[in-house]
Image (cartoon, grey):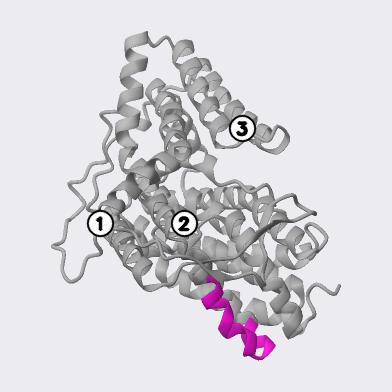
Amino acid sequence: MGGLKVPKDSRTKKKKRGFELPHTFVILFIIIIAVSILTYIIPAGQFDRVTNPSTGMECVDANSYHRVEQAPVGFFEIFLSIQKGFVDAGSIIFLIFFAYFCIFTVVKTGALHGAINKLMTKVNGREKIIIPLFMIIFGLAGSTYGEMDTVYGLIPIFVGLAIALGYDAMVGLAMTGMAVAIGFASATTNPFTIGIAQSIAGLPIFSGLLFRWVVFIIFMGVGIWWTLRYSKKVKSDYNNSYVKDIDFGTLELDKGELKNADYTIKHRIILIMLFVTIGFIVFGSLKLSWYIDEMSAMFLLSGIIISIFWGFKPNQIADNFIQACSEMVIGAMVVGLSRTILIILQNSQIIDTIIYSLYLPLRNMPKWLAAEGMLIFQNILNLFIPSGSGQATAVMPIMIPLADMLGINRQVAVLAYQFGDGYSNLFWPNGCIAIMASIAKVPLGKWYKFFLPLFGIMFILESALLLIAMFIGYGSF
């Protein structure tokens, strides 16, 4: 795949005008500086932590907030925090490297070219069915068993597939990263969000499932519609692509050369190996308590086995590994910089103060307005605590007593958490989208051009569905 490029002589580059969003690194560094300044302004404070007997997880005591000694971040500590952020995010960084090495190896064998050639032959003239098909598959994976990190390794495949089918990298990113994130947020049985939140709220695990399936169908439908709408414009004229001026290097598959790609028995076996790898990872995650470290090891092992099976010599395997990692450096660095924000907030002990300050205004609102306030609260908080399970343990012990006090059903409070925590992962630059976009080589500014109008539509839907849930007595049936 190394030398394959999409011909660009038909892609007219237009002179850039007006404001252009800064590089992802610049955006994240600005946030790091801003958060560091906040450590001098926001008082340090803490909630006491207690062990929730139903989950065994450490949660906050909602009535225990108290001030502690201020611990602002100094100039040198900013850069020390960046180093610590990279170390703390090391497991995710290596997942990106090892997963892409596995995919890169498959590409080097030509198996991906052959498979896409076969697929293009079968769907000739009906390419657009590929988009909803895979978006539904990835969406269901995110919604049911909480798929998220494993998709990082698959994004390059679908970027190449989208380009080969006459679309662009944005479509490939939407088919995988956006779809799995929408599914993750539209959680039906997602154990990492709904499972934890309902346990803390004292609700039966995965109760209220029917309403959440309606939520899933609505949001996946909107996401698919938005992607098809954009892909149609790109298909008709590539100059409509938001990433028409980006060189995607080895992620680009030449449609002409794909037509001549062989698809041998050996290629099929290699793809079976890849799918078996993913299947092992899913099984391990669900049944063996595997997490990121085990996923990384599985991808690395699979990449080596596939290399040996294909007949790559040791030096070739080493060269492939180095090249694969070099192509993912930007994505890996985004992970480290994003984690720096959380490191600064934790060390300065201002996260709990932010939570407490956002919570206070909700206490005196009418219950319908307070429910909407919870949604806004969670959207804002996702900038500071991008972990779904981390948010649940930090916030639900506060939101549940508030919901009880205001007469809001606990199921509605969980729904507000689910919405606010989930969909904004595709918005905040320290969320999963920064990693996914970097892997797809899509600049964050280009992503926002594609996604911001959709995020506005989704937020309106979130607000409406939250009100509907209140008025139909969601949680009482």
> Compared with residue 241, is residue 330 higher up or lower down, i.e. above or below?
above
Mark 3 lies on a secondary structure that is helix
- Where does the image place residue 158, in percent across and percent down from the top left? 45, 42
Q: Which residue is mark 2?
A: 346
Indicate the amino acid at tag 3: Ile
- Where does the image place residue 249, in percent across and percent down from the top left? 27, 38
Circle 3: is it few (<14), some (14-19), or many (20+) Cα within 10 Å?
many
Q: Which mark, residue 202?
A: none
Indicate the amino acid at tag 2: Gln
Circle 1: is it few (<14), some (14-19), or many (20+) Cα within 10 Å?
few
Residue in the picture at 83% in, 60% down: 204
Q: Which residue is mark 3?
A: 281
Left/right of residue 421 with respect to residue 210 in the rendered view: left
Mark 2 lies on a secondary structure that is helix
Q: Decide: marks 1, 3 in contact (CB < 8 A)?
A: no
Q: Nearer the viewer, residue 141 or 259?
A: 141
- Where does the image place residue 58, in percent across and percent down from the top left? 67, 53
Q: Decide: marks 1, 2 in contact (CB < 8 A)?
A: no
Residue in the picture at 25% in, 29% down: 3
The residue range painted magenta reads 355-370
> Compared with residue 369, is residue 70 higher up or lower down, i.e. above or below?
above
Q: Nearer the viewer, residue 165 or 92?
A: 92
Separation of residues labelled 1 and 3 (CA atoms): 42 Å
Mark closer to the chain start, 1 or 2: 1
- Residue 187 visible at all: no
